[in-house]
């Protein structure tokens, strides 16, 4: 079985790749940063320096592939974030169609395509449609909010004993570990018994407010951790400082507002098949705590 994994150097792509390699499938990893995957090459994977917008490279890399993992990678310097999502999806879908790839596992989002003006949540709905039009068997995994986003706040935790987000302190959020997303993606990539085009929400083991997450952080770190709500505008300024274009700032601002809406996408009802195993406490102990002095 030959499986191609796009955006393989990100958290979800890497985890997916690790599981696919462990299953001894032929594993092709696509990334703009092949140096980040040297350890997976040592385990038997093949890495190709191909970006998700490289239509010709994708066609070549996916020849004779049985399954494709797809995730639209972030791109801060694009003039149009919407165009980036559509352009890359079209390149991936062309490869699926031309090479007759039987199965696609696409990482989408809870609420995908629910309505316009939700930033990337709206965009991934169109990505889903583009892949469905290939006629392949397609599973769209729709995860909630990544626990691993806290890894970007290590310095804030160390220096200020606080964490920050643009959401109300009592906002209910379905936190999920990217490891669990990668595990589910790998499971479906390796399973050739499913068919059709469908979606599955992934919402972690429970919803938690920001106050509940900081209570867990305080307990694990054995010191008070405060939650500080920041404005969407301040986050847009931070994005600008690291090279985000005005359009990216605008669209991610819309995303933050959408995710913070108490009646929005995170009000999605839980079902048993949306539950994944890693708890927030486990994430903090296993991934966040080792980075905190």
Image (tube, rainbow, N blue to C red):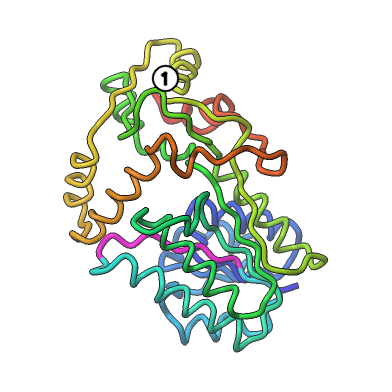
* Residue on which the image places disc 1: 211
Q: Quadrant of residue 100?
A: bottom right
Residue in view at x 44 percent, y 42 percent? 264
Looking at the picture, does residue 287 appear above or below residue 32?
Answer: above
> Left of 163 or right of it: where is 172?
right
At horizontal 68% and vertical 57% (from top left) the residue drawn is 186
* In-front residue for pair 237/18: 237
Kind of element beneath mark 1: helix
Quadrant in the picture for the C terminus: top left
**Vertical arrangement, residue 248 with respect to residue 96, above or below:** above
Magenta range:
69-77
Q: Is residue 77 left or right of residue 277?
A: left
Q: Answer whether residue 74 is magenta in the image.
A: yes
Report crowding for label 1: few under 14, some 14 to 19, many 20 or more residues within 10 A (C-alpha).
some
Residue 274, given in percent of the width and then of the height, sits at 66, 43
206 falls in the magenta region: no
**Residue that appears at 20% across and 44% down:** 238
Across and down, in percent, residue 219 comes to: 49, 13
What is the chief secondary structure element of the magenta stretch? Answer: loop
Q: Residue furthest top?
A: 223
In the picture, measured across the screen, residue 150 lies left or right of residue 59, that is left
Task: Tell whether 276 sits left or right of 126.
Answer: right
- Residue for point 49% across, 18% down: 216
Q: Residue 79 appears at what percent x and percent y?
A: 23, 69
């Amino acid at each position: 079985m030959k499986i191609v994994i796009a955006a393989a150097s990100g958290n979800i792509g890497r985890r997916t790749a690790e599981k696919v390699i462990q299953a001894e499938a032929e594993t092709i990893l696509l990334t703009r940063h092949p140096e980040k995957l040297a350890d997976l090459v040592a385990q038997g994977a093949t890495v190709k320096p191909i970006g998700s917008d490289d239509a010709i490279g994708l066609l070549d890399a996916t020849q004779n592939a049985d399954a494709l993992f797809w995730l639209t990678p972030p791109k801060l310097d694009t003039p149009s974030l919407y165009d980036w999502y559509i352009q890359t999806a079209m390149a991936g879908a062309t490869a699926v169609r031309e090479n007759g790839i039987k199965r696609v596992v696409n990482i989408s989002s809870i609420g995908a395509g629910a309505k316009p003006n939700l930033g990337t949540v709206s965009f991934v709905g169109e990505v889903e449609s583009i892949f469905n039009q290939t006629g392949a068997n397609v599973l769209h995994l729709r995860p909630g909010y990544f626990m691993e986003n806290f890894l970007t706040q290590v310095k804030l935790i160390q220096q200020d004993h606080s964490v920050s987000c643009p959401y109300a302190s009592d906002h209910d959020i379905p936190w999920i570990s990217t490891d669990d997303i990668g595990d589910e993606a790998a499971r479906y990539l390796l399973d050739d018994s499913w068919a059709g085009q469908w979606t599955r929400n992934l919402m972690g083991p429970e919803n938690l407010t920001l106050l509940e997450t900081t209570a867990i952080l305080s307990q694990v770190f054995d010191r008070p951790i405060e939650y500080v709500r920041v404005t969407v505008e301040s986050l847009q300024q931070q994005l600008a400082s690291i090279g985000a274009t005005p359009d990216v700032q605008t669209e991610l601002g819309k995303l933050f507002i959408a995710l913070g809406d108490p009646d929005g996408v995170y009000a999605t009802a839980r079902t048993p098949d949306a539950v994944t195993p890693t708890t927030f406490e486990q994430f903090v102990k296993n991934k966040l705590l080792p980075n905190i002095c």
